[in-house]
Amino acid sequence: MMLENRDRRLSVAPMMDWTDRHCRAFHRALTSRALLYTEMVTAPAVLHGDQERLLGFDAVEHPVALQLGGSDPAQLAEAARVGQAFGYDEINLNVGCPSDRVQSGRFGACLMREPALVADCMAAIREAVTVPATVKCRIGVDDQDPEVSLFATVDACAAAGVEVFVVHARKAWLQGLSPKENRDVPPLDYALVRRLKRERPHLSISINGGIASLDEAEAHLDDADGVALDGVMLGRAAYHEPALLGQADRRLYGEAVADVDAFEAIDRYRPYMAARLAEGVALPAMTRHMLGLMHGRPGARAFRRILTVEGVRPAAGLEVLDRAVEAVRDAEARREAVQAA
C-alpha cells in the first residue's frame, strides 16, 4: 500500500505501552482511514528479539506504520526490511522521544543535534524498503534555536529523499524534564510548523502536540492563512477519548458515511476480541484501551469500573464487556426517562 498525502490527514501517535496491536485493532473499529502507528521498537530489538511478539499485527489494522528507534544506519536498514516483510505500510524513524533510556542509546530526540546522522539513517532505510520512509521529530532540543534545528533536520533528510515528516511542535528538554513533562511543559510552536510547510511546500508535513479535538485538527488542515498542513497526529486525545475517532472518516476525509458510535465500535471490535481470547490473551489486555470510550456519557464510570474490576478475574470473557455496555445503556435510559417526565 502506497500512502498518499490524503491518507495522512489523521494519524494516531506512537505511544509507548499504549498503541499495541490490541489498541490499534480497537482504533480501527472506529476509523477505517486514520493511519495507525506502533509503539516505538528499537532496531536491535527487532533484529535480536521475538519478532512475532514485537511486530506481529492483525490485517485489520491497515494502514499501519512501524516506528523504529535507533541511530545505526545498517541496523535500521535491516530492521526496516524486517518490518516491510511483516507487511507494514510505512517505516518511521523516532527523532522525538526524550526519555533517559532513549538518550543512552543515542536515538530519539537527541538526534535533533545530529541532522547528518539522521539523514544517513533515513537514506539507509529508504534504500532497504519500497514503502514510505518517514521521520517523526521535535522542533529542537535544549538550547537549540528551533528555527535552525527543525529546518536543518528536515532539509538533511529531504536531501536524502525523505518526503514525509511528522513534527511534534515542542522542543524536548533532555535534562530537567521527565518524558511526561516534555509532553506538556515546553511551549507549542504551531506557527513554526506552518512556516516549514509554507517554505517547503513540496514536503508532506503533519503536526503533532497538544491537539485535543477534531475541531482543532480541522483548523490545522484548513488553509485560511494560505498554508494547509498535510496531516494531524493525535496522541492522548485519541487514546483517552477514542470515540472522537468515530467521526474522523466523515469530518476529515469527507467520506459520505455515518459516524461510528461507541456501541457500533464495540460490535466491530468484538470478533477480534473473541479470537484473541481463544488464543489465550487476557481480557484486560484489550479492554484497557477502551476505558475512555464512554467519556462524557451516562454510565461511563460504571463502564470503566466493570471492565477494570471484573475484567481481571480468572477466565473473564466477553460477558464482562456485555455487562459494562448494559450499564451504559441503562444509565442512558434512566436519563431519557427523567428528561421525558
Image (cartoon, grey):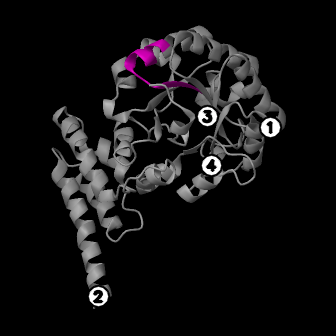
Give me the residue at 77% from left, 40% from top.
Answer: 198
Position of residue 145 relative to residue 77, above or below, is below
The three-letter code of the residue at mark 3 reads Ser
Instruction: Give the labeled residue for mark 4.
Output: 221
Between circles 4 and 1, the one closer to the viewer is 4
Task: Report the magenta residues as a range.
Answer: 81-96
Q: 30 or 24: nearer the eye?
A: 30
**Are there few (<14), some (14-19), or many (20+) residues within 10 Å of tag 1?**
many
Q: Earlier in the sequence, mark 4 or mark 3?
A: 3
The three-letter code of the residue at mark 4 reads Leu
Instruction: Give the labeled residue for mark 2.
Output: 340
Measure the alpha-carbon separation of dots 1 and 3.
20 Å
Per the rendering, the mark at residue 99 is 3
Instruction: Give the labeled residue for mark 1.
Output: 146
Measure the alpha-carbon separation of dots 2 and 4.
41 Å
**Is residue 226 in view from this perspective?**
yes
The three-letter code of the residue at mark 1 reads Pro
**Residue 272 at x, y percent in the picture:** 24, 39
Magenta span has 92? yes
Q: Earlier in the sequence, mark 1 or mark 3?
A: 3
User: CB of mark 4 within 8 Å of CB of mark 1?
Assistant: no
| Secondary element at tag 4 | helix
**Residue 135 at x, y percent in the picture:** 62, 28
Q: Earlier in the sequence, mark 2 or mark 4?
A: 4
Between circles 1 and 2, the one closer to the viewer is 2
| Secondary element at tag 2 | helix
**Residue 214 at x, y percent in the picture:** 53, 56
> From the viewer's perspective, is 250 left or right of 313?
right
> From the viewer's perspective, is 77 left or right of 259?
right
Between circles 1 and 3, the one closer to the viewer is 1
